[in-house]
Amino acid sequence: MFIHPLVTDTATLAALCKRLADADFVTVDTEFMRENTFYPDLCLVQIAGGGEAAAIDPKADIDLAPLLHLLVEEPVLKVFHAGGQDLEIIYNLTGKTPTPLFDTQIAAMALGQGEQVSYTNLVQSYLGIAVDKGARFTDWSRRPLNDRQLDYAIGDVTHLAALFPKMLDKLHRTGRGVWLDEEMARVGDPATYAQEPDLAWLRLRLPSRKPEVLGRLKALAAWREHEARGKDVPRGRIIKDETIGDLAGSPPRHQADLGKVRGLSAAWAQNDIGHRLMQALEHAQPLPEAEMPAREVSRPGLTSEGTLIADLLKLLLKVRAKEANVAPKLIARGDELDAIAGGVREGLPVLTGWRMDAFGKDALALIDGQLGFAVRDGKMVMSAL
């Protein structure tokens, strides 16, 4: 594979992207820093396809438009590994996500390599190559980058370009490609990366069910989102999650009281950001009934017998997933098993399509007393009753 020097000008990038648009697929990875910023600070983009590979320097005097057009507009398949953070960066720059999309970590779930197999382990498994991890803690924002750093970064996409066809061939031979459609669609959904301020409170955990408390939580979370974005700093640099929870549950009456709140300095009692925080509290409205979160209990709506049934279903899932050599998470989620144990038979993905064939029908048979557990030669197996 031909490896380009570091791409630092728009003309070279445009020519590269024009060629890559005709490739069968392109593999993509990014290097970024986000310890001190709200948005990930994009430091390097690596891409490979059609027998060539390159690293692109966003820190140079370069227009990334040709690259972004390739990623979100051209029909060439884009291949990532655990690409959630890469997709977040692309969404932040374009308001779109790459399509069509393939994620090798998701594909590995259908090929019996666990729910979150690392890129290093995948390369070792399929290519027999031990990835050099020496440069993984690089500060990618610093310039210049040395040859070892660039070799490490570009290796991420050249190895990916070699293992992707092998994984695709195995998916075709096992007939499991369709198993991945829903997961790939979820990862590629732009809504996953939108981060609307009015929805920021949903990422926080507060045990209260009082509408006025949750209304304040929603208002404070949205306020922090705007503050952090405006200053381009991590949310926690503005105010910690636990402090937001304390303020929502026991709101101060006056700004002067902020200096007594755990997690805030005395300066909040009189500075501008403290004033804005108090305004957010003053304008907070009780959370409407339609926005109230579902009650979170360990087994919603289950009797003690139902809880035992759900546990049996989880055991059955482990058995069937091991037999099929697939990650259990790809077949069913825990809340779906609870729902089946509670009597739900409609609207569950696990009771439709390939999941029904792989597990759902056996789950129902177990509940109906038509299937049982047995141990043969030291192994757990299922027997028809």
Image (cartoon, rainbow, N blue to C red):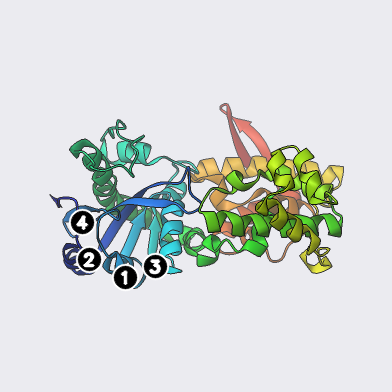
Distance, label 2 to label 3, CA atoms, is 16 Å
Q: Is residue 285 above or below residue 7?
A: below
In the picture of the structure, the residue carrying the numbered disc 1 is 69
Depth order, front residue of 107/247: 247
Instruction: Point out residue 252 in the picture as x, y percentages from the top left corner.
Output: 83, 49
Dot 4 crowding, Cα within 10 Å, few <14, some 14–19, many 20+: some
In the picture of the structure, the residue carrying the numbered disc 2 is 17
User: Where residue 8 is drawn, which disc sits there?
Assistant: 4
Q: Earlier in the sequence, mark 4 or mark 3?
A: 4
Tell which tag, 4 or 3, sits nearer the viewer.
4
Distance, label 2 to label 4, CA atoms, is 14 Å
Q: Could you tell me which residue is drawn at 41 percent across and 40 percent down?
A: 118
Disc 1 element: helix
Q: Amino acid at mark 2?
A: Cys
Q: Is residue 108 above or below residue 18?
A: above
Instruction: Point out residue 281 in the picture as x, y percentages from the top left corner.
Output: 78, 58
Q: Can residue 32 be seen in this snapshot? A: yes
Q: Can residue 385 be seen in this snapshot? A: no
- Quarter of the rendering occupied by the C terminus: top right
Dot 1 crowding, Cα within 10 Å, few <14, some 14–19, many 20+: some
Instruction: Point out residue 336 in the picture as x, y percentages from the top left corner.
Output: 68, 54
Q: Amino acid at mark 3?
A: Thr
Q: Amino acid at mark 1?
A: His
